[in-house]
Image (tube, grey):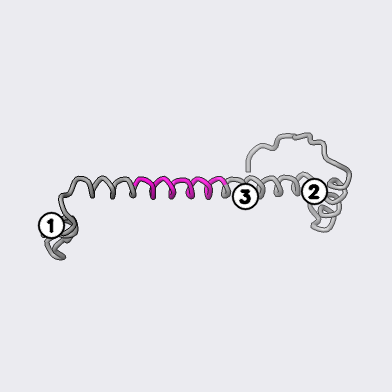
């Protein structure tokens, strides 16, 4: 786990009493209880940030795909040509 460092925090009395109560009930030190709580908070925060990032990436990907589709429609001459352009032969992988 590595070297331990000291941390001094100021909290309200009710929180301290709840920490002391939980510490006694779980038979662990206040320091260990605080460390576990902070680890859980960091994990949750990281997961929330990652979820937000993935949602933003999905939005960006959707917007990009819509732009690409619009560009394709502008470049390819007619609807029947566009649909046949994307039809691949199953075995050869060649465009039909």
Left or right of residue 90: residue 43: right
Q: CA distance from mark 2 to mark 3?
A: 23 Å
Per the rendered image, the range of residues in magenta is 49-64
Q: CA distance from mark 2 to mark 1?
A: 68 Å
Residue occupying the point 53% across, 47% down: 52
Mark 1 / mark 3, whichever is N-terminal? 3
The image quadrant that residue 87 belongs to is bottom left
Is the magenta region chiefly helix, strand or loop?
A: helix
Residue on which disc 1 sits: 95
Pick the front one: 8 or 77: 77
Where does residue 72 sit, x and y in percent of width and height? 23, 48
The quarter of the rendered structure image containing the C terminus is bottom left
Residue 77 counted in the magenta span: no
The answer to whether residue 94 is above or below residue 68 is below
Residue on which disc 2 sits: 29
Residue on which disc 3 sits: 44
Pick the front one: 58 or 67: 67
């Amino acid at each position: 786990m590595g070297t331990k460092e000291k941390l001094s925090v100021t909290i309200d009395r009710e929180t301290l009493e709840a920490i002391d109560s939980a510490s006694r009930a779980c038979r662990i030190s206040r320091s260990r209880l605080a460390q576990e709580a902070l680890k859980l908070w960091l994990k949750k925060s990281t997961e929330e940030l990652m979820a937000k990032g993935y949602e933003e990436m999905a939005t960006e990907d959707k917007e990009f795909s819509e732009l690409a589709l619009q560009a394709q429609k502008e470049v390819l001459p007619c609807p029947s040509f566009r649909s046949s352009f994307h039809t691949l032969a199953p075995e050869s992988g060649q465009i039909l």
